[in-house]
Image (cartoon, grey):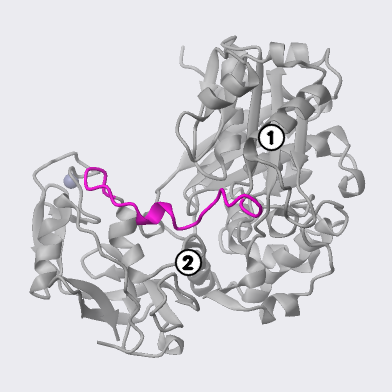
């Protein structure tokens, strides 16, 4: 009999979460220190200990990340995963962890991430682009960098340019995403930016890679987070209301932007459809959406590709405050990468906020009666998309 | 060359792309081609990603195409590059898509769908970078 991914629905749950960021953008701690803090906090949250952990997941720019991490933590895992797809890595980790936990390859999985681009200089955009290895030639260096493109922003600007030309999307439409996200950030005491923001201010901000301007871009901050997962039967005996993994899906279509088949359609079309099919839900069933917003256009494309509106209608969809507090589709309820925090790979924060929304513990940012939350990560240059559907007890 | 052409980076050359870069020395746009699929393969690679043939050939293209998408970039990692300048994805008439610069006109004169043809930006080592102009 062929295997059916929907067998995984509700078998595993997020049982512990932690994240950290600060209004200054700085945490003044090392990445190793932040990882330890987050693992401890997430395990305490779940009511589990380090001794329970036998599945370890992280995405670092250095190779063999889980080896160093496990050694420092004193964990000897049976499941180890360093999958690195950029910002979507942690959604991919959840998908892999769910499969591993459901099959009994491990009992308790921890996913952790820390990065300190602001205080520690750990994230150096452009550094990797300069190393040429003739035996593993980088297409980006040979076919894109000679033209002076600034990455990642230039790649997203190209996608925005095409979407505007093909569908009549405007800068005002994109600005609404920055504005609605800021409204959520205003209620999050840890957010980098909380002052009210108007569309006029976004439009008037400095042009960087047109059509994208400064306020179309995410913040650059220190930040870290962790989540703990276990099987549903065990989850029900732990401290917190479980946030069940109802569905997960991953897809990637390219690495560098000039190889993206259609700049208006991301791999989220497939990852989202797979995750929702596994969960047995439709977009209309989603109570809150946590979707990657490295740039305003990243969120717009994902909203379309996940099926919340038709392709090309994202601009129209976000008008009238759809994504804002009180809107029809509350989106990026913690203030997102645009205003809360963005340490380079934002995907862990999507999952933490989605799980909190399911539990009902998002403080002032809590949306009423959330049963289904979607965390949708994006990695690379709109390259690698991974979608996780979380559900409350009522959905299982 | 045009006043708004940006490059200043070292341009690497992979072994598999040698015929492309050799072509640029004579200002010829020579792209890899799969004879089985009868379509271009760009960037050049070891095996056709459609049919797995390793017998890929090289073909000189017209150098004509249209702007698929573009961005006006207001800063550069390369200090001596005048800004703003235009980075575009150009769809060639024969089917390949290339990243390039649009040169020879002001950034405000560039639009999606605009027909362009190849212009050559000489490099110090005798090769040239294909750029595009109206
Ligand atoms: Zn072929």
Which disc is residue A33 wearing?
1
Q: Magenta segment, principal secondary structure? A: loop
Q: Is residue B105 placed above or below A211 in the rendered structure?
A: below
Which disc is residue A212 wearing?
none
Residue A34 visible in rendering: yes
Q: Is residue A323 magenta?
A: no
Quick one: label 1, few (<14), some, or many (20+) residues within 10 Å?
few
Measure the alpha-carbon separation of dots 1 and 2: 33 Å
Q: Tell me which corner region of the image, top left, top right, bottom left or bottom right, holds residue B8.
A: bottom left
Residue A227's spot in the image, x, y percent?
71, 30
Q: For the magenta stretch, what is the residue range?
A: A117-137
Q: Tell me which corner region of the image, top left, top right, bottom left or bottom right, holds residue A233.
A: top right
Quick one: label 2, few (<14), some, or many (20+) residues within 10 Å?
many
Q: Is residue A136 magenta?
A: yes
Residue A309's spot in the image, x, y percent?
64, 56
Residue at point 66% right, 49% down?
Answer: A291
């Amino acid at each position: 009999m062929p295997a059916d991914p929907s067998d995984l629905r509700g078998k595993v749950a997020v049982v512990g979460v932690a994240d950290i960021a600060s209004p200054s953008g700085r945490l003044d701690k090392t990445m190793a220190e932040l990882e330890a803090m987050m693992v401890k906090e997430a395990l305490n949250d779940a009511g589990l200990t380090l001794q329970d952990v036998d599945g370890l997941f992280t995405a670092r720019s250095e190779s063999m990340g889980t080896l160093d991490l496990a050694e420092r933590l004193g964990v000897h895992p049976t499941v180890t995963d360093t999958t690195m797809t950029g910002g979507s890595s942690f959604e991919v980790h959840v998908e892999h962890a769910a499969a591993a936990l459901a099959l009994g390859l491990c009992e308790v999985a921890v996913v952790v991430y820390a990065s300190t681009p602001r205080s520690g200089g750990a994230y150096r955009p452009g550094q990797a682009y300069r190393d040429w290895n003739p035996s593993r030639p980088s297409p980006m260096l040979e076919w894109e960098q000679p033209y002076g493109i600034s990455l990642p922003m230039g790649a997203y600007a190209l996608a925005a340019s095409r979407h505007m030309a093909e569908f009549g999307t405007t800068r005002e439409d994109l600005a609404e995403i920055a504005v609605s996200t800021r409204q959520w950030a205003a209620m999050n005491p840890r957010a980098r930016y909380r002052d009210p923001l108007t569309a006029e201010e976004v439009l008037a901000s400095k042009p960087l890679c047109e059509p994208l301007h400064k306020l179309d871009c995410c913040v650059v901050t220190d930040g870290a987070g962790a989540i703990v997962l276990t099987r549903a039967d065990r989850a029900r005996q732990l401290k917190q209301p479980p946030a069940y993994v109802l569905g997960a899906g991953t897809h990637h279509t390219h690495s560098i932007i000039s190889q993206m088949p259609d700049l208006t359609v991301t791999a989220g079309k497939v990852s989202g459809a797979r995750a929702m099919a596994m969960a047995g839900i439709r977009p209309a069933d989603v109570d809150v959406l946590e979707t990657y917003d490295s740039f305003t256009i990243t969120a717009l494309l994902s909203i379309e590709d996940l099926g919340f509106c038709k392709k090309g209608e994202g601009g129209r969809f976000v008008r009238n405050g759809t994504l804002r507090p009180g809107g029809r589709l509350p989106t990026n309820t913690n203030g997102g990468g645009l205003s809360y925090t963005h340490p380079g790979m934002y995907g862990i924060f999507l999952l933490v906020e989605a799980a909190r929304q399911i539990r009902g513990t998002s403080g002032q940012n809590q949306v009423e009666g959330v049963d289904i939350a979607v965390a949708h990560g994006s990695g690379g240059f709109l390259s690698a998309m991974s979608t996780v559907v979380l559900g409350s007890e009522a959905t299982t | 060359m045009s006043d708004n052409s940006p490059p200043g980076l070292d341009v690497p050359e992979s072994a598999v792309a040698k015929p492309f870069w050799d072509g640029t020395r004579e200002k010829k746009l020579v792209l890899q081609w799969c004879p089985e699929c009868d379509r271009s393969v760009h960037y050049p690679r070891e095996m056709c990603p459609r049919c797995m043939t390793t017998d890929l050939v090289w073909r000189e293209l017209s150098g004509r195409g249209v702007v698929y998408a573009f961005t006006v970039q207001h800063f550069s990692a390369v200090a001596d590059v005048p800004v703003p300048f235009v980075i575009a994805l150009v769809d060639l008439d024969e089917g390949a898509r290339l990243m390039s610069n649009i040169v020879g006109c002001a950034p405000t004169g560039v639009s999606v769908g605009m027909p362009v043809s190849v212009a050559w930006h000489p490099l110090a080592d005798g090769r040239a970078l294909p750029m595009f102009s109206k």
